[in-house]
Image (cartoon, rainbow, N blue to C red):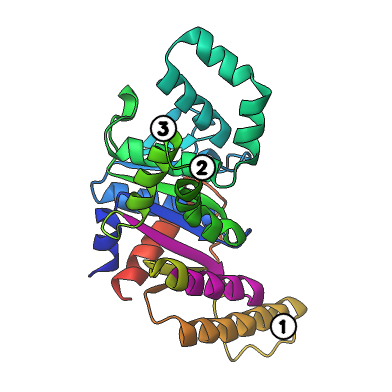
Amino acid sequence: MDVLKRLQELELVVVTGKGGVGKSVVTAALGRLLAARGRKVLLFEVDPRENLHQLLDTQPSGGEIINASPRLYLQHIEPRELIDDLVREKLKVKLLVNRVLASPVHRHFTEGAPGLKESAVFGRALRMVEGHGPRILRRPDVVILDAPATGHGVSWLAAPQLVADVVRSGPIGHMAELISAFLGDPSRFGVVVVTTAEEMPVEESLELISALDERFDREPEAVIANALYPALDEDDESGDPATTLWRDRRAINVTQLERLDASWAGPLAEIPLLPIDPGPAHVGAIARRIETQLRSA
């Protein structure tokens, strides 16, 4: 199937990769690309630094859903708050809600229970695509999650099943089972891996691809190699230090792309460094590059 068509038919796309490779700008670019194709897109961000609003030139989300452009929305979410919202939804009685939320047992449980926060994030995505969102965006067509760095990527995806295995009853156990089924459905959920063509990011990306195959019997929808040094004029022999440095970085990129290509036979988009300040213009340029690259993948 055409990669772009595949992405626009999914309900949840998780964008992951090593820290510093440009996950947030790729998340924003994918959102812009799918919105331009007529999909209502909600970008989820869990990083406390809230980068997406700067890339899309909107006000900070602060937990609210912000309309960034036609059919494109973003929301910063705090996993702990999502768990508290679940308590409010299930208990309903204000006195009981306040007692539970103020309880040290509840605080220790929500902070220490393995996989609970991750499951809460996926649970919110599931509720949104099933039509339980607020008035501003009752039901997005697709949620794109700007996920934590690769080292946590597999644990994030495994979290709902871990919770379902441990908590077998009650609202949390039921929620975890529903989320596990959601993430196990390839017609609804997919992963995009972002890397740079450097040794460690490529190594982590290949490990993630292998783990997805071994643990979930899945492959990424695509791998995006971001911030590549473009080739220089081969006739330039000026010996300028900046030119020499550029050539060295380009040579590293070529070597690592070859390494990636040898192990990954799926769609690969190569995105060059662009002389554009971070913001909507940069996001738009990367979206166009991704579209071109994935069309030819």
Is disc 2 in contact with disc 1, using a CB cutoff of under 8 Å?
no
Q: Report the mark closest to the observer, 2 or 3.
A: 3
Residue type of the residue flagged with mark 1: Thr
Disc 2 residue type? Glu
Identify the residue at the far right of this view. Answer: 241
Sequence order check, earlier mark of 3 and 1: 3
Query: Which image quadrant: the N terminus?
Result: bottom left
Q: Which mark is residue 224?
A: none
Residue closest to the far top: 95
Disc 2 on helix, strand or loop? Answer: strand
Q: Residues within 10 Å of mark 2 (few under 14, many from 20)?
A: many
Q: 121 or 248: nearer the eye?
A: 121
Tag shown at residue 171: 3
- Which of the pair 227/11 is nearer the observer? 11
Q: Which residue is mark 2?
A: 45
Q: Within the image, what quadrant is residue 65 found in?
A: top left
Q: Which residue is mark 1?
A: 244
Q: Amino acid at mark 3?
A: Pro
Measured Cα–Cα span from mark 2 to mark 3: 25 Å
6 sits to left or right of 123:
left
Residue at image position (52%, 8%) is 95
Camera-nearest residue between 39 and 157 = 157
Q: Earlier in the sequence, mark 2 or mark 3?
A: 2
Q: CA distance from mark 3 to mark 1?
A: 60 Å
| Magenta-highlighted residues | 189-212
